[in-house]
């Protein structure tokens, strides 16, 4: 097999990978925002991914700050670094980051109201630090509904990728009862990009553990198919709300 093949696959995987996590431990988000003058830190230091005989560390960070009632500024990113398996000469860790502004258009069940909560999140995708990459943009529409036994978050995210191709992601997050200290969670989505030979199909299952009113821990396993290549990822992290 040509040594060019792993590098080509790696670059395409970066090009079609979903945007940085927006609500731990998921790739999608919810229709809620941080309160004004509250910083929400979402940190995923213990994340490992296996694909094509490679083992990668993929630590993530998300910084949310409530700037106005119903609006938050989000800075998020992840780093991919190969720690075992095939590696190209000169290959370095890659950082992907984005900046977005998320706003709640309709206050609903996530804000202790009635009916669905609706939010939008326009995002600027910054160029990756390694490989061919440019600026991109995304615009997410999120609809969330909470019932006593179940919470659903529907996401539709059209985007202009860092590879300058049109893409769209559609999926759903399912959470167990919000009142449980440890609640089960799941996520599935499909992402297709123009020019890519096949779509990304992803599924995740895990738990969120509320340690205190302002601190939660999470753990999850994600299984996906990207360009026909299997991906397995283990995630663990922490979400911490800090008033200022």
Image (cartoon, grey):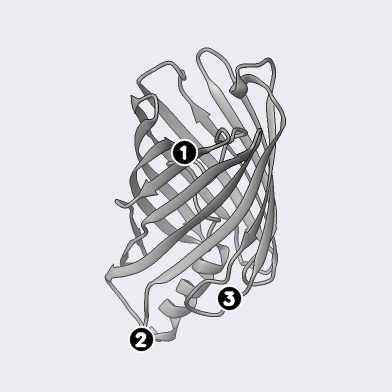
Residue farthest along the front direction in this orientation = 244
Query: Which x, y percent locates residue 74?
Result: 56, 49
Residue at horizontal 37 percent and vertical 81 percent from the top = 91
Residue situated in front as seen by the camera: 152 or 110: 110
Q: Secondary structure at mark 2?
A: loop
Circle 1 residue: 244
> Residue 26, relative to residue 163: is it above or below?
above
> Residue 4, relative to residue 175: is it above or below?
below
Which disc, if any, is residue 90? 2
Which numbered disc, 2 or 1, marks the residue closer to the eye? 1
Q: Secondary structure at mark 1?
A: loop
Query: Label 2 to label 1, Cα distance in Å?
Result: 43 Å
Q: Earlier in the sequence, mark 3 or mark 1?
A: 3
Query: Label 3 to label 1, Cα distance in Å?
Result: 36 Å
Residue farthest along the right direction in this orientation = 105
Based on the displayed image, in which of its 4 quarters is residue 199 positioned?
A: bottom right
Which disc, if any, is residue 133? 3
Q: Are marks 2 and 1 in contact (CB under 8 Å)?
A: no
Residue situated in front as seen by the camera: 182 or 5: 182
The quarter of the image holding the N terminus is bottom left
Query: Which x, y percent locates residue 2?
Result: 40, 86
């Amino acid at each position: 097999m040509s040594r060019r093949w792993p590098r080509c696959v790696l670059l395409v995987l970066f090009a079609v990978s979903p945007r940085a996590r927006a609500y731990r431990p998921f790739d999608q988000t919810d229709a809620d925002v941080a309160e004004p003058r509250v910083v929400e830190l979402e940190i995923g230091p213990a994340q490992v991914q296996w694909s094509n005989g490679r083992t990668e560390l993929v630590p993530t960070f998300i910084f949310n700050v409530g700037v106005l009632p119903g609006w938050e500024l989000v800075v998020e990113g992840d780093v991919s670094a190969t720690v075992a398996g095939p590696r190209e000469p000169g290959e370095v860790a890659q950082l992907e980051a984005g900046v977005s502004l998320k706003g709640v258009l309709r206050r609903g069940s996530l804000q202790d109201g009635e009916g669905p909560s609706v939010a939008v999140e326009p995002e600027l995708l910054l160029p990756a630090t390694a490989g061919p990459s440019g600026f991109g943009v995304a615009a997410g529409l999120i609809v969330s509904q909470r019932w006593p036994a179940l919470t659903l978050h529907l996401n539709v995210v059209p985007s202009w990728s860092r590879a300058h191709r049109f893409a769209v992601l559609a999926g759903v997050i399912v959470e167990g009862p919000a009142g449980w200290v440890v609640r089960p969670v799941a996520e599935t989505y499909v992402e297709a990009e123009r020019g890519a030979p096949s779509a990304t199909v992803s599924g995740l299952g895990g738990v969120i553990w509320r340690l205190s009113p302002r601190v939660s821990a999470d753990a999850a396993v994600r299984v996906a198919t990207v360009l026909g290549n299997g991906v397995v990822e283990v995630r663990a992290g922490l979400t911490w709300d800090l008033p200022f």
